[in-house]
Amino acid sequence: MTATYRQPGIVLTDRRFTVPLDHDDPAGETIELFAREAVASDRVGQNLPWLVYLQGGPGFGANRFVGKGAWFGRALKEYRVLLLDQRGTGHSTPANRQTLPLRGGPAAQADYLARFRADSIVRDCEAIRTEVTGGAPWTVLGQSFGGFCATTYLSFAPEGLAGALITGGLPSLDAHADDVYRAAYPRIERKVAAHYARYPQDVERARRIADHLLTHEVTLPNGYRLTVEAFQSLGILLGGGEGSHRLHFLLEHAFVPTPHGPELSDAFQEEVQGLLSYASHPLYALVHEAAYGQDERPTAWAAERVRAEFPQFDAAKSLAGDEPLLFTGETIHPWLFDCDPALRPLRETAELLAARTDWRPLYDAARLAANEVPVAAAVYHDDMYVDTAHSLETARAIRGLRTWVTDEFEHDGVRAGGPRVLDRLLALARDEI
């Protein structure tokens, strides 16, 4: 089923595909994928190469562009673009607290979600490519987790690729989740220190909010339990180009006077619940650490366990002394499934995924070492979400990959830098620089 319509300068076509839930059982259960095809209106009848976009996450659908913003307009100058909602996201068959009980109990839900990693996403792409391109290889643009998927694509189906462009998403090929987070916490601490250097008044503001949360029970309007650990997780903002400013503006209006003393303002609570809720992207919480599982070792709530090695992130200890409160970043913790009403019914499912020991490898080092697909990757100098050292090690392991290492952008550089980032990567991949 397709539907075609227009925005200024663009023709869009909504497309739906049926793919196996388990590609090893092609005759078994199926799920639906949604993708939006886009072409410049003055190039509709032309035989253009295809670029498929894989969003970051996991758990987020593809961008919903209005017009030719960010990298999108540059891509439309020479490509027909497919904005794919990866399985379980966007308009594809949903996977959330409302739909997952249709699978059965937590064990059945966990088995189902184990098929929502990069390997399955790549096989989805290959399943629909023939229908979309007539069999021709396409170029993949992978942002963040989408870059992880692109690396899996190069490992297991390079014949489907004319090129691969990766932005902030070169994963370690062999790091366990513990290694990922052991590298992450020092990066997060650096980002927090940089934020406080920019906005020193936020040191006291953050401490005051944390103290309030340690001594009061706060439930946000949507039912989210705002604990001090949940408040600290707002540090996820600090990985984006505007994130430090957004966090500052949030903290500056936290309290209002009331007959009962200072309370967290309605405006603050409203904004915080929008930032913390996983209602729109529960897969991010459910399979985030599973994205690092590649062997018989469970991920076992790696971010929570490794956090204990960094006591400076303990809010109570910081407040007992005169240390600034440290925010955290892109980390998933078991308490999220107690705090967030969108996740509470899925706590046992998450526990089973964290304990799983049958993860398949996501990357093939030997095949990557023999790679023949043109590949270029933007690596951000101090990326909070993806470790720069891990990325550069992987870049050296992929034959022919060319990197652009920059401190001009943060993790969201493909959005902030738009055409320039895509121009640079295309030139590198084509060996024009």
Image (spheres, helix red, strand yellow):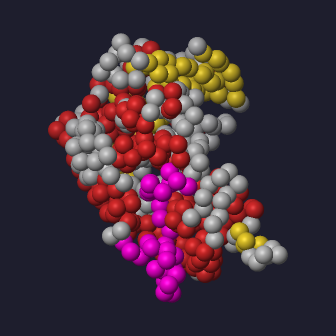
Q: Position of residue 286 (x, y in %)?
A: 45, 44
Closest to the observer, 330 or 232: 232
Left-right relation of 414 to 431: right
Q: Is residue 137 visible?
A: no
The answer to whether residue 127 is above or below residue 364 is: above
Q: Is residue 318 left or right of residue 264?
A: left
Q: Which residues are magenta?
A: 310-339
Instruction: Tell me which corner region of the image, top left, top right, bottom left or bottom right, holds residue 207.
Output: bottom right
Please give the name of the residue rendered at 61% of the width and 75% of the height, measured from the top-left corner.
215
Whether residue 97 is visible, yes or no, is: yes
Which residue is painted at 60% across and 15% down in the image?
Answer: 2
Residue depicted at 51% across the width and 31% down the height: 101
Q: Residue furthest right?
A: 259
Indicate yes or no whether the magenta region holds residue 314: yes
Q: Is residue 24 above or below residue 406?
A: above
Q: In the rendered image of this protein, does residue 261 appear above or below residue 78?
A: below
Q: Which of these two is toward me, 389 or 181? A: 181
Identity of the residue drawn at 20% across and 35% down: 367
